[in-house]
C-alpha cells in the first residue's frame, strides 16, 4: 500500500480556550517562537481549477450514497492546501467548488499543480458540478436517482447508512482488479483526516481512504508542530487567545502555527493553524472551519482552527 502525500477526529480538549478579551491584542507574550520559521505570511487564496471529474467512482448514484469529485488546479510549489469552498444550491441543482490555498507572501516562482478531492452527498435529481474561477473548466453533470425504500445495513453497501457513518465511513465506489465495486470506507486527503490511521491508496481498493496503519513513523514524520506518539501525530502547540495573537511573520508564532493574513475582515495577521483539510489539525476545543464559526471572534480568514467553546 502506498501512502499519499496528502489531511475527522477532533483532538481531545486541552488547555487554552480561545474566547474573551481583546481580539486585537498585541503579539503573543507566551509563545515559543520557532527559530526555523521563515519571514513569511500566508494569505487564503482561490486557485483557478483546470479540470473537474468524478474521482474513481463511475457507478450510478442514488440519494443517500456519497460520491467524490476531483478538482485539478494550478498554483505554486510553496502553496499550502486550504479547505476548498463547496457551495451547494439546491434550488438550481448546482454545486460550485472553489479550490483554495494558503499562498506564501512573498511567494515562490516554481509552478505546481494539485488535485483536491471533495465528497458530496446530493438529493435526487440532475446536478451540475462546476469549478469556480476566471476560466472555469467544463462542468460535469451527475444524475442522482431516488433512494431505495429499504432498511439500512446491506452488505456490500449501496447507501451511506449501510456504513458506520458516525466514524466517517461512506459507501463509495471504485474500480478494483475484479471490476467496479462499492465499499464502506473513510474518505480522506491527508493523514490528519484519519486521526487513528493513514490516508492511503490501495492497489485493489479505494484511493485516498483511511487505513488502520500508523499515521507516522521514523520514515513518515508528522507535519511541523506535531509529534509522533504511538503512531499518531499529536499537536505540540497550544491554542489560546494569547497564542493566536498578532504577528508580522511566522517567526512570531509558536511551532505549528503560521502568520495568516486577514481576508474576511480588517485586522492584523494572526498566528493560526492553517487547516489544509477539514481534518484533525486543531488542539483543544477547536475545529477547522470558516471564520464565522469561531466563537472567540479571532479568526479573520476561513480554514483555520476556530474556538468551539467550553
Image: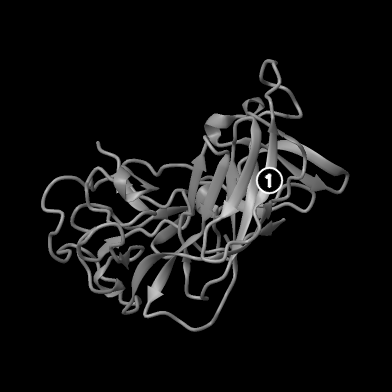
Quarter of the image where the C terminus is located: top left
Q: Which quadrant of the structure image shows residue 61?
A: top right
Image point (43%, 59%), residue name: 227
Q: Would you say 238 lies left or right of 52 here? A: left
Q: Which quadrant of the structure image shows residue 113?
A: bottom right
Name the outermost residue toward the bottom.
Answer: 109
Q: Is residue 47 above or below residue 232?
A: below
Q: Would you say 254 lies left or right of 85 here? A: left
Residue 278: where, in percent of width, then height?
Answer: 46, 49
Q: Which quadrant of the structure image shows residue 31?
A: bottom left
Image point (51%, 66%), residue name: 134
Q: Is residue 263 above or below residue 182?
A: below
Q: Nearer the viewer, residue 220 or 81?
A: 81
Residue 156: where, in percent of width, then height?
Answer: 76, 29
Residue picked out by circle 1? 141
Q: Is residue 198 visible?
A: no
Q: Nearer the viewer, residue 126 or 307?
A: 126
Q: Would you say 272 lies left or right of 10 here? A: left
Q: Nearer the viewer, residue 190 or 179?
A: 179
Image point (53%, 45%), residue name: 196
Name the outermost residue toward the right.
Answer: 178
Amino acid at each position: 500500500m502506498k501512502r499519499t502525500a496528502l489531511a475527522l477526529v477532533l483532538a481531545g480538549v486541552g488547555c487554552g480556550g480561545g474566547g474573551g478579551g481583546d481580539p486585537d491584542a498585541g503579539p503573543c507574550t507566551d509563545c515559543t517562537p520557532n527559530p526555523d520559521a521563515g519571514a513569511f505570511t500566508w494569505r487564503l487564496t482561490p486557485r483557478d481549477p483546470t479540470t473537474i471529474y468524478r474521482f474513481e467512482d463511475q457507478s450510478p448514484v442514488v440519494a443517500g450514497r456519497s460520491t467524490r469529485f476531483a478538482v485539478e488546479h494550478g498554483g505554486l510549489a510553496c502553496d499550502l492546501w486550504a479547505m476548498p469552498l463547496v457551495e451547494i444550491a439546491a434550488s438550481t441543482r448546482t454545486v460550485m467548488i472553489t479550490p483554495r490555498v494558503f499562498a506564501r507572501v512573498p511567494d515562490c516562482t516554481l509552478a505546481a499543480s494539485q488535485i483536491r478531492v471533495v465528497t458530496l452527498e446530493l438529493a435526487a435529481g440532475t446536478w451540475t458540478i462546476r469549478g469556480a474561477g476566471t476560466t472555469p473548466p467544463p462542468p460535469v453533470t451527475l444524475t442522482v436517482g431516488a433512494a431505495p425504500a429499504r432498511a439500512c445495513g446491506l452488505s456490500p453497501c449501496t447507501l451511506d447508512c449501510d456504513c458506520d457513518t458516525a466514524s466517517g465511513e461512506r459507501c463509495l465506489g471504485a474500480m478494483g482488479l475484479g471490476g467496479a465495486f462499492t465499499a464502506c470506507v473513510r474518505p480522506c486527503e491527508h493523514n490528519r483526516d484519519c486521526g487513528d490511521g493513514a490516508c492511503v491508496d490501495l492497489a485493489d481498493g479505494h484511493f485516498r481512504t483511511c487505513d488502520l496503519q500508523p499515521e507516522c513513523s521514523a520514515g513518515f514524520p508528522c507535519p511541523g508542530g506535531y509529534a509522533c506518539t504511538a503512531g499518531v501525530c499529536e499537536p505540540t502547540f497550544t491554542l489560546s487567545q494569547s497564542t493566536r495573537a498578532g504577528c508580522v511573520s511566522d517567526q512570531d508564532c509558536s511551532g505549528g502555527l503560521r502568520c495568516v493574513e486577514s481576508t474576511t475582515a480588517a485586522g492584523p495577521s494572526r498566528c493560526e493553524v492553517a487547516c489544509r483539510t477539514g481534518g484533525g489539525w486543531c488542539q483543544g476545543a477547536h475545529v477547522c472551519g470558516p471564520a464565522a464559526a469561531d466563537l472567540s471572534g479571532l479568526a479573520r480568514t476561513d480554514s483555520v482552527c476556530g474556538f468551539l467553546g467550553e
